[in-house]
């Protein structure tokens, strides 16, 4: 039931861009994005609600296509601090919140 | 205010022993979640509480796992007769529903090692 993320891993140089995708076979009410650094708890980035909605957070933004049941996270001009594992999460049946398998992002100098 | 607090932060136990993991959510957060994260893996959903009620326990991996929540606040996750495959980080998160406009706030987790 969990959402599907792609790619599984990305290696970037500082300043490069990346896109992480999250899709679901079931209807989505909302999509959350979190980042987890090694040895730490996941930290909230943003929530998206409506179809086609786009949100931004510094140089990190995301879109949510409700019709396609997909969300994408865009990281532009990546910084070393962006390294970590990114998870999308979504709520099914109003009482279960599932995360995707994660995308490991490694930004190198 | 204080964040989500989990204890202990680390637990080493022998195979076959029981363990209890505790989660103290953010005050006022009625929703509470438990997840399990094995080394280098994703977040496996275990159970969800709304208040003291857990309407669906099907995410718990086996009948050795149980969870309860009292007073709409503190939750404990109990693992009986621990096995080596139970070794993982157990994360608790709380939220103020509805989830379409409220993030999950995570604790720092309990790292369980079963020897």
Image: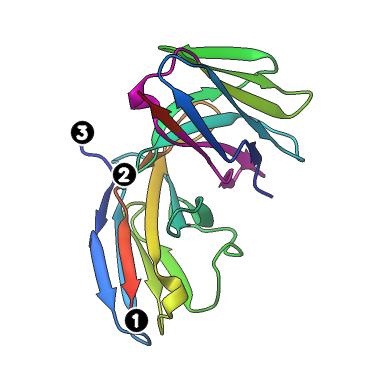
Q: Chain of mark 3?
A: B
Q: Position of residue B31 (x, y in %)?
A: 45, 45
Mark 2 nearby-residue class (10 Å; few <14, some 14–19, many ≥20): few
Single out the mark in the foreground, 2 or 1: 2
In screen coordinates, is B77 left or right of B57?
left
**Tag 2 secondary structure:** loop
Q: Is residue A89 above or below residue A65?
A: below
Q: Position of residue A79 (x, y in %)?
A: 37, 19
Q: Position of residue B97 (x, y in %)?
A: 48, 36
**Tag 1 secondary structure:** loop
- Quadrant in the picture for residue A28: top right
In screen coordinates, is A1 left or right of B19?
right
Location of mark 3 (residue):
B1
The residue positioned 57% from the left and 64% from the top of the image is: B57
- Quadrant in the picture for residue A19: top right
Q: Is residue A97 magenta?
A: yes
Q: Evaluate whether label 2 is on the same chain as label 3.
A: no
Q: Evaluate whether label 2 is on the same chain as label 1.
A: no
Q: Is residue A66 above or below residue B12?
A: above
Single out the mark in the foreground, 2 or 3: 2
Q: Is residue B47 above or below residue A101?
A: below
Location of mark 1 (residue):
B18
Q: Is residue A2 magenta?
A: no
- Quadrant in the picture for residue A37: top left
- In terms of sequence position, does the residue under pointer 1 or pointer 3 come before the other? 3
Do residues under tags 1 and 3 come within 8 Å of each other at their CB atoms? Answer: no
Give, as a single range, the part of the protein colored magenta: A76-105
Q: Quadrant of the C terminus of chain B?
A: bottom left
Q: Chain of mark 1?
A: B
Location of mark 2 (residue):
A40
The image's mark for residue B102 is none
């Amino acid at each position: 039931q969990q959402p599907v993320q792609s790619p599984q891993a990305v290696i970037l140089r500082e300043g490069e861009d990346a896109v992480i995708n999250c899709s679901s076979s079931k209807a989505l009410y909302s999509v959350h994005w979190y980042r987890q650094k090694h040895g730490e708890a996941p930290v909230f980035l943003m929530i998206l609600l409506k179809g086609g909605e786009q949100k931004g957070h510094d140089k990190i933004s995301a879109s949510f296509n409700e019709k396609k049941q997909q969300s994408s996270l865009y990281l532009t001009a990546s910084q070393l601090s962006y390294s970590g594992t990114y998870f999308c999460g979504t709520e099914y049946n109003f009482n279960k919140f599932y995360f995707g398998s994660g995308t490991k992002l490694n930004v190198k100098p | 205010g204080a964040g989500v607090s989990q204890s202990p932060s680390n637990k080493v136990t022998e195979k076959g022993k029981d363990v209890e993991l505790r989660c103290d959510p953010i005050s006022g957060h009625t929703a509470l979640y438990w997840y399990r994260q094995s080394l280098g893996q994703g977040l496996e959903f275990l159970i969800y509480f709304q208040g003291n009620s857990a309407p669906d326990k099907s995410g718990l991996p086996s009948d050795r796992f149980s969870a309860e929540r009292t007073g709409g606040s503190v939750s404990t996750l109990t693992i009986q007769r621990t096995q080596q495959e139970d070794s993982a980080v157990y994360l608790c998160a709380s939220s103020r529903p509805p989830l379409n406009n409220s993030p999950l706030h995570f604790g720092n987790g309990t790292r369980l090692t079963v020897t």
